[in-house]
Amino acid sequence: MSLSLHQLHFSYIRSQQSDIWQRDIRFQEGAYYHIRAISGSGKSSLVQAIYGLNKNYSGEISYAGKQLRSMTPDQISNIRAREVSIVFQDLRLLTEFTASENLELKRKLRDFTSASDLERMAGELGIDHLLNRKINTLSYGERQRVAILRALLQPFELLLLDEPFSHLDNMNIQKAAALILKEVQKEVRHCSSPIWKKTNISLIIFNWNCKKRHGHHSKNTGTT
Amino acid sequence: MDIIQKILAQRKSRFQYLPALAILLGFLLLMMAIQFYLNVQFILNGKAQKAGQEFLVVNKQINSAMMTRPELSSFNEQELKTLQQLPYLKKVVPVISNQFPILAHSMGDLGFSTQLFFESIPADLLDTDSSQWTWKSGQSSLPVILSADFLNLYNFGFALSQGLPQLSEESVKALNFQVTVGNASEQETYRAEVVGFTQRYSSILIPESFMQYANEKYGQETERHVSRLVLQTEEADNPDLQQFLNEHAYVTQQDKLKGSTFARIVRLSSMAISILGLFILLLAYLIQSIYLENKILQHAESLKLMIELGYTPKQLLQFYLKNPSGKSSEWWYFMPRFNRIAMGFTSIFKTNGPRNSGHDTCLSFCGHHHLYQLTYFVVTTKNQKND
């Protein structure tokens, strides 16, 4: 599933130099993108616009040639459930419920990941012992790992990561990055549909602050 | 327990069925008022009768002076005009009497012969079926509608005291007797048939067409005397009407006036109960709205997140329509379910709007968009069924 931006611009964002704003961009399938910019240059606005949460933009965002703006709520929901997954910058977890319940809410949506796989993945992130604790009793770093795990429980062709490791130490960043890459590659095994190929999965990472990462395209939304 | 149900079904209010109970009570009162009104109408009129269809037969009070001057008991043109101008009377119709001698005699073994009188009124003022009560020139039979009081007088007064058989309405209809009308020089004989009985008029009624024909042909008076009138009114118990009748010494059926007063009180009582019922229904709607707002605010964040995670509005609707508690789908159960469905829409509005305006959208929605919400719900549910 291709993602294209056409002359995208937010009136409230002023940037002198940008690889994103007011340009025609087509994100290649199977590629990893790292978008870097200083605070306030529009990274979150961009991720929310791509995810359909912000429509205050000029220009066009298209999925497989279809404009996001013209999609119905049900169509947008279907894209979110089947094709695009996200780790929100502000995590967006139900704090009154347990980590397990938050994860189940996503897992039950498509029933894509088995309960045992979920436990295994939680173990790899080091949060398997926290699953029965309420979110409001977890640290920010633990919550962030729950949010990362939640994003991996569904099928996707595009994974949006909005400052996904901002609360993690280097060791946990290593663990999370390894799991993300492993699960991205694992999509092939999970999906029987021929359109699900490893090379079709795009990863757009917003402000991944580690310097040495996998070979990928790098863009910026403002002055680096 | 399903995770969605757990999230959305939390913090149940013990008052959630209050609007449903209020609706039940409101409808009960409304239905009771209508039933009560119809029952009383039935008792008063024998059958359901439209409001504004009350008929009074009016004549002048007979006094000693009229014994020698019968024309005094008649209504003159001026009096008729005055009556017709009264605002509370819809119709003033004179009862036409025969101006020629009538002799009735039996055709069979029942030997009787008597002088008789006829009166005539328009067919639409009758309280009985008048389909057979027609006469055309040249017709040998003469349809007659008899006062039910006359039959009662015969059955319970005359027949019992004289040892004669009592007659049912059907047997009277089966009897034929002859009627001879005319004057000394010319006479005509008709076969009279009783085609119905009237509760409203104490008289023997024949069709207007025959009365006109016979009065013109055999009438002995040059001037028409109207001694009885039928008044059609919406409110027989109108105090102004009663005062007018008393002032002019006009006499009518007092039981009708009392019955009408009773009906008026019943109408007012029914209306009061109906208004109370409607008020309770309105109150139920308001309580439901407040309850709705409360539930929306309770679950707004959860629903918004569910939409953001990929749940579709249709899925949420499905959840609410599935009847999550497993109870039977009684009509009153619709109310709390409806609340939850509406909450789903709140999150839709919030999700599709700018991120930072979500809460404002919700508040605006809660405060001002109930009708929109109802419409949206109905349309979406319909579409869902069609799918």
Image (cartoon, coloured by chain):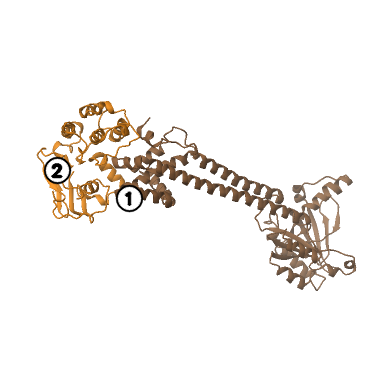
Chain colours: A orange, B brown
**In the image: residue B201, left or right of residue A59:** right
Q: Nearer the viewer, mark 1 or mark 2?
A: 1
How far across and how far down the image is residue A210, in percent?
Answer: 13, 38
Quadrant of the drawing holding the N terminus of chain A:
top left
**Residue B344 quadrant:** top left
Decide: is B82 above or below A144. below
How far across and how far down the image is residue A107, in percent?
Answer: 28, 33
How far across and how far down the image is residue A58, in percent?
Answer: 22, 56
Q: Residues at marks 1 and 2, common chain?
A: no
**In the image: residue A159, left or right of residue B16:** left
Secondary element under disc 2, as helix, strand or loop, is: strand
Decide: is B183 above or below B236. below
- Residue at mark 2: chain: A
Q: Which residue is mark 1?
A: B357
Decide: is B190 above or below A91. below
Q: Identify which amino acid the numbered label 2 is placed on.
A: Tyr
Q: Which of B347 and B319 lies nearest the eye of the viewer?
A: B347
Q: Which residue is mark 2?
A: A33
Disc 1 from disc 2: Cα separation? 29 Å
Q: Residues within 10 Å of mark 2 (few under 14, many from 20)?
A: many
- Residue at mark 1: chain: B
Secondary element under disc 1, as helix, strand or loop, is: helix
How far across and how far down the image is residue A34, in percent?
Answer: 14, 43
Please tell me which residue is depicted at 28% across the width and 28% down the height of the picture: A130
